[in-house]
Image (cartoon, grey):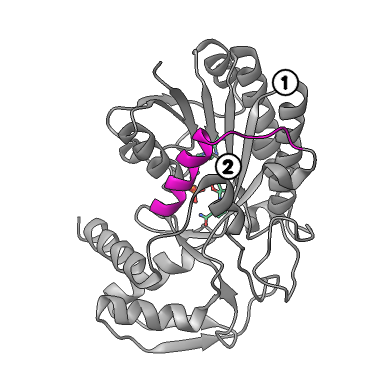
Amino acid sequence: MTKRVVVTGGAGFIGSHVADLYLARGYEVTVLDNLSSGKRQNVPEGATFVQEDVRAPAARELLAGGGFTVLNHQAAQMDVRVSVRDPGFDADVNLRGLLNLLEGAREGGVRQVVFASSGGVVYGESDKLPHPESAPKLPVSPYGVSKLASEYYLAQYAILYGIGVRAMRYANVYGPRQNPHGEAGVVAIFGSRLRQGKAITVYGDGSQTRDYVFVGDVARANVLATEAPAPVPQALDDAAVNVGTARETSVAALAQTMMQAVGRTVPIETAPARAGELRRSAVAVEKAARVLGWRPEVELAEGLRRTYEWLSSVEAA
Ligand SMILES: NC(=O)c1ccc[n+]([C@@H]2O[C@H](COP(=O)([O-])OP(=O)(O)OC[C@H]3O[C@@H](n4cnc5c(N)ncnc54)[C@H](O)[C@@H]3O)[C@@H](O)[C@H]2O)c1
C-alpha cells in the first residue's frame, strides 16, 4: 500500500527536507503551507502543493477526505519574539491550527502524527545538561508554551483515538534553506557576514551555548519516527523524542568553526548580551537511538560548510 503523508510547512526550511526524504522513500506527499515564511520553490517536485492556512476549514477537509495515513506537522508560528509580542496570534496558529488538523486527521483515519516540537524551549533553564526528555518543563515564552500544550493535545489524541503520535523535540536546526529567524538563525547570519567579508557580532561574552543539529539528520529522524511503532503514552514524555547532538557549542566556538570550515576569516565584534536568552542548551539523544535507531551523523564543521555553500549559491543567484 502506498503511504500517503501530508507535510504541513513543507515550503519551509525543515518541512521541505522532510518532504524530500519522504518522496525518496516512496511516500506520496502532499505539502500544505500558506507561504507566510516558506517559499513555493522549496516544495519538492513530485509533491502535491496545497496553499492553505492550517487554521482553514479546507485544511481540515483535506485531512478528513484525502485518504492519508500520516500527518507530519511542521508548520508553525516559530518566532519567539513574535510570540512575546502577540501571544494570541502564536496560540491561534500553533494550537487552533493543530486542533483543526487533528480533527481532520481523526475524521480521515490518519494512523500516525509526527509533530515538530522544540527541545530549545520546552525545558527550563538548568545546568544539568544535556536535557533528557524527562527534564522539568518550564517554557519562558508563549511559543514554548504552545509547543508544550501541543504535545499534551497530541497525547490526548493518542489516548482517545488510538492515533500514533511522536513529538520531535528539535535542538537548534541549521542547514540549507534555513530561515534567519529560526532557533539556529545565527548560522545564516554568520554565513552572510562571512560571505560579505564583514565582522561577526557576538552578543555577551560568547560563552552561551546551543546544540546545533543538521537539517538532513532531522529529516531522517522524522521518517524513522513515522515508521517506528508509537506506544500509547502513559505520561507526556512517552511520546517525545529529542533530536539533537547532546553537544553544547558556544557562539564564539561556532564562529571559529565556521570560519575554519569555509576558509575565511573576519573580525569578531562584541555587543551587550540580549535579555531573555537561555544561557545554555543541549538535549540528550539516547532515547532517539533506542526507540528510532537514530543518531546524528553530520559533524558541525561539515554541516556548516554545506550551509555556507548553499548560502553562497542563493546569494550569488
Ligand atoms: N529551526 C529550528 O531550529 C527549530 C527548532 C525547534 C523547533 N522548530 C520547529 O520546526 C518547525 C519548522 O520550522 P522551520 O525552522 O522549518 O521554520 P520555517 O518558517 O522555515 O517553516 C515553517 C513553515 O510553516 C509555514 N506556515 C507558518 N504558518 C502557517 C499557517 N498558519 N498555515 C500554513 N502554513 C504555515 C510557513 O510558510 C513555513 O513554510 C516549526 O514547527 C518550528 O517551531 C524549529
Ligand 1 is within 8 Å of the C-beta of the residue at disc 1: no
**Circle 2: residue type:** Ala
Residue 299 position in % (x across, y down): 38, 68
Classify the position of the C terminus by image quarter.
Answer: bottom left
For discs 2 and 1, the disc positioned in front in the rendered view: 1
Residue 16 position in % (x across, y down): 39, 41
**Up-down: is 150 above or below 298?**
above
**Label for residue 76?**
2
Q: Nearer the viewer, residue 218 or 149?
A: 218
Q: Nearer the viewer, residue 180 or 119?
A: 119
Residue 68 position in % (x across, y down): 50, 18
**Circle 1: residue type:** Tyr
Q: Report the residue at 73% width, 57% height from top.
A: 141
Residue 176 is left or right of residue 133, and the answer is left
Q: Secondary structure beneath disc 2?
A: loop
Q: Residue furthest left?
A: 317
Q: Nearer the viewer, residue 202 or 171?
A: 171
Residue 264 is left or right of residue 11, and the answer is left
Q: Earlier in the sequence, mark 2 or mark 1?
A: 2
**Label for residue 161?**
1
Residue 161 position in % (x across, y down): 72, 20
Q: Judge whether residue 219 is colored magenta.
A: yes
Q: Report the residue at 63% width, 57% height from top.
A: 119
User: Which range is magenta?
Assistant: 216-233
